[in-house]
């Protein structure tokens, strides 16, 4: 294993030495007891007082090895413990390794054996997956603001408890188990400050439990986001619950009964239900004509400015605050969504759309070069093929859409022009310009589509300089290097042309040659040869006119080349941060 070698251990020691007292983030992956003990752990333990974030994805056998850190975790703020690989491990009933960590406020725990004692009165965010619920609720009553529980085993020991600062609660579990888990928790807590609530199951019983919790908590004017998730469509009514949430801005629920849609629709004859709602997400399976009309009426009524009544303890509300920003319908699959989209738009497949689909299919059949490599075996004298292509292009050029309403964009098969663009962009080469902010060294690399490791062509590593008097010199720059930098500046245009020529020769995007300075005639000759192979001189113009649909896409793609960096360039690098930039060019 590389991390056990002397070279790696020396490297780690040197990094820790040079970083002095800066807090460090630790991620240890030791899922098997055969990985332990490990010399890296011994080195890290010497700096345990600097641990700012600790993530353990390991077996329980690592816990005794970390005991020397007990009492030294002064800087630990975030703790992630994932123990899922040794369920049968006979661990101690409790672990107090993290009990004394005065800065710890964010914990994620996935543990199937034993119990971790956490510091009392300081946790702000707690996320637990599996096992029995930790005592964190009773220990962090006055500090906890975010609580996420997934698959936590209900117990009979949960007392009635009030969490005065809890603002976000999420309870989820596997289908069928979440009902009992949600009721077990919701029936025993009081949450007066809750603003975000996510429930992983939807039943009448759970909705009733949420409603009773609201009554106990007296926070009817504070909840802003409510999400009910469900794997099926129970048609549960939410109206009574929503009447207690006048400040709700985000609502995501399974498709409710029709009376709920009527209640959400603004009507001057009755008080408005959740008047501040901005986004409504509905999970639906199918929509009848009646439901479609009700939804259209709902959206229409919510999109008009409305005077909104105020309620006690609520913030001031004004005319226009009731307008929807988004109404989304989520369907099980694309086919169903497409069908209902046409229904909402009152669209039918007219002859114009059917003919466009037919012409698109014929063009892609007769001209596979749009989405495959050029057929170099095809003879330039293939008169029959040229005639068929020419006749088809004649039909496309002569086609007229009299009414734009006759067309509709489809999910799976868009319109002819979009389909062509999609086919071209679906087969690409990748030009990658790696750069690092403040580094000043990078190279251009050409890789095949779908693989960033297989390199077709690459330039050497070169340095980018800055000659501005007001810009900071990059690493390694000095007065002695100004002469070569000036030479680089005067020759940058030549180098840029050479670099682009090398890149474009490796990337089969022939028309790009036109953009290289000094090679315009060669570029036109190359284009003529390429188009002749595909459609002959007679079809070249038509082919080129169709190609113009997607030609502008390549013009807007950035491509870093060898050049002197200005202050603006360096500022942009700093803003972008470290990483790489990928520019895709179609084959």
Image: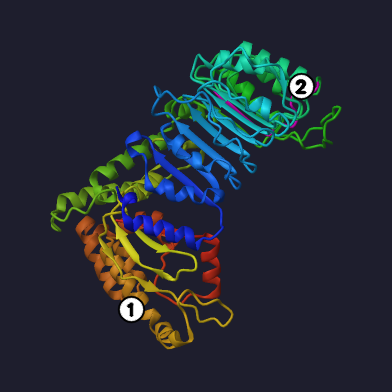
Residue where numbered disc 1 is placed? 518
Taking the spot 39% from the left edge, 71% from the top edge, the residue there is: 561
Residue 128, numbered label = none
Q: Nearer the viewer, residue 444 or 114?
A: 114
Q: What is the magenta range?
A: 271-283
At which x and y percent is residue 258?
63, 15
Left or right of 328? Residue 92 is left
Magenta region includes residue 555: no
Quarter of the figure with the C terminus? bottom left
Q: Residues within 10 Å of mark 2 (few under 14, many from 20)?
A: some
Taking the spot 53% from the left edge, 26% from the top edge, the residue there is: 94
Q: Residues within 10 Å of mark 1 (few under 14, many from 20)?
A: few
At which x and y percent is residue 209?
67, 14
Magenta region includes residue 278: yes
Mark with earlier residue (1, 2): 2
Residue where numbered disc 2 is placed? 217
Identify the element where label 2 is drawn. helix
State the scheme by which the image is colored: rainbow
Q: Nearer the viewer, residue 75 or 552?
A: 75
Taking the spot 22% from the left edge, 47% from the top edge, the residue there is: 388
What is the chief secondary structure element of the magenta stretch?
A: loop
Most distant residue in the right direction? 312
State whether residue 148 is above or below residue 491.
above
Identify the element where label 1 is drawn. loop
Residue 403 in sight here: no
At which x and y percent is residue 490?
41, 85
């Amino acid at each position: 294993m590389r991390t056990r070698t002397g070279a790696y251990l020396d490297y780690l020691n040197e990094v820790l030495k040079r970083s002095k007292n800066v807090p460090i983030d630790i991620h240890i992956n030791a899922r098997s007891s055969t990985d332990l003990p490990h010399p890296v752990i011994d080195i890290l333990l010497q700096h345990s007082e600097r641990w700012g974030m600790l993530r353990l994805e390991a077996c329980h056998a690592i816990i005794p090895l970390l005991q020397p850190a007990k009492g030294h975790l002064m800087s630990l703020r975030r703790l992630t413990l994932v123990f899922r690989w040794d369920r049968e491990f006979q661990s101690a009933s409790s672990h107090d390794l993290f009990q004394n960590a005065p800065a710890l406020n964010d914990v994620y725990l996935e543990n199937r054996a034993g119990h971790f004692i956490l510091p009392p009165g300081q946790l702000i965010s707690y996320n637990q997956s599996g096992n029995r619920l930790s005592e964190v609720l009773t220990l962090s009553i006055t500090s906890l603001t975010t609580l996420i529980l997934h698959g936590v085993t209900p117990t009979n020991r949960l007392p009635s408890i009030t969490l005065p600062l809890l603002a976000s609660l999420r309870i989820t579990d596997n289908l069928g188990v979440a009902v009992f888990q949600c009721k077990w928790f919701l029936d025993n807590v009081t949450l007066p400050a809750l603003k975000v609530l996510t429930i992983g199951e939807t039943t009448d019983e759970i909705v009733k439990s949420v409603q009773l919790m609201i009554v106990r908590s007296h926070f009817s004017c504070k909840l802003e986001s409510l999400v009910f998730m469900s794997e099926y469509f129970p048609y549960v009514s939410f109206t009574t619950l929503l009447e207690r949430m006048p400040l709700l801005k985000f609502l995501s629920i399974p498709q409710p009964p029709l009376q709920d849609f009527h209640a959400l629709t603004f009507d001057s004859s009755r008080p408005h239900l959740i008047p501040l709602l901005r986004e409504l997400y509905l999970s639906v399976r199918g929509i009848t004509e009646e439901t479609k009309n009700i939804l259209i009426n709902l959206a229409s009524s919510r999109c008009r400015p409305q005077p909104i009544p105020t309620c006690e303890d609520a913030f001031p509300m004004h005319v226009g605050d009731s307008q929807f920003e988004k109404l989304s319908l989520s369907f099980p699959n694309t086919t169903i969504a497409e069908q209902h989209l046409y229904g909402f738009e009152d669209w039918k497949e007219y002859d114009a759309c059917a003919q466009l689909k037919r012409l698109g299919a014929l063009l892609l059949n007769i001209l596979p070069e749009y989405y495959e490599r050029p057929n170099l075996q095809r003879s330039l004298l293939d008169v029959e093929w040229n005639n068929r292509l020419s006749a088809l292009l004649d039909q496309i050029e002569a086609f007229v859409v009299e009414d734009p309403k006759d067309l509709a964009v489809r999910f799976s098969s868009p319109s002819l022009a979009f389909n062509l663009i999609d086919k071209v962009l679906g087969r690409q080469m990748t030009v990658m310009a790696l750069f690092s902010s403040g580094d000043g060294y990078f190279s251009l690399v050409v890789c095949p589509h779908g693989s960033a490791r297989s390199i077709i062509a690459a330039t050497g590593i070169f340095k980018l300089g800055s000659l501005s008097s007001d810009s900071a010199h990059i690493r390694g720059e000095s007065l002695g290097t100004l002469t070569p930098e000036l030479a680089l500046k005067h020759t940058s245009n030549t180098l840029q042309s050479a670099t682009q020529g090398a890149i474009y020769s490796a990337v089969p995007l022939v028309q790009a040659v036109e953009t290289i300075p000094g090679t315009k005639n060669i570029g036109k000759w190359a284009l003529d040869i390429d188009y002749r192979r595909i459609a002959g001189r007679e079809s070249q113009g038509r082919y080129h006119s169709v190609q113009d649909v997607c030609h502008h896409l390549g013009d807007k793609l950035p491509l870093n080349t060898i050049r002197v960096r200005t202050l603006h360039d360096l500022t942009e690098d700093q803003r972008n941060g470290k990483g790489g930039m990928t520019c895709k060019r179609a084959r």
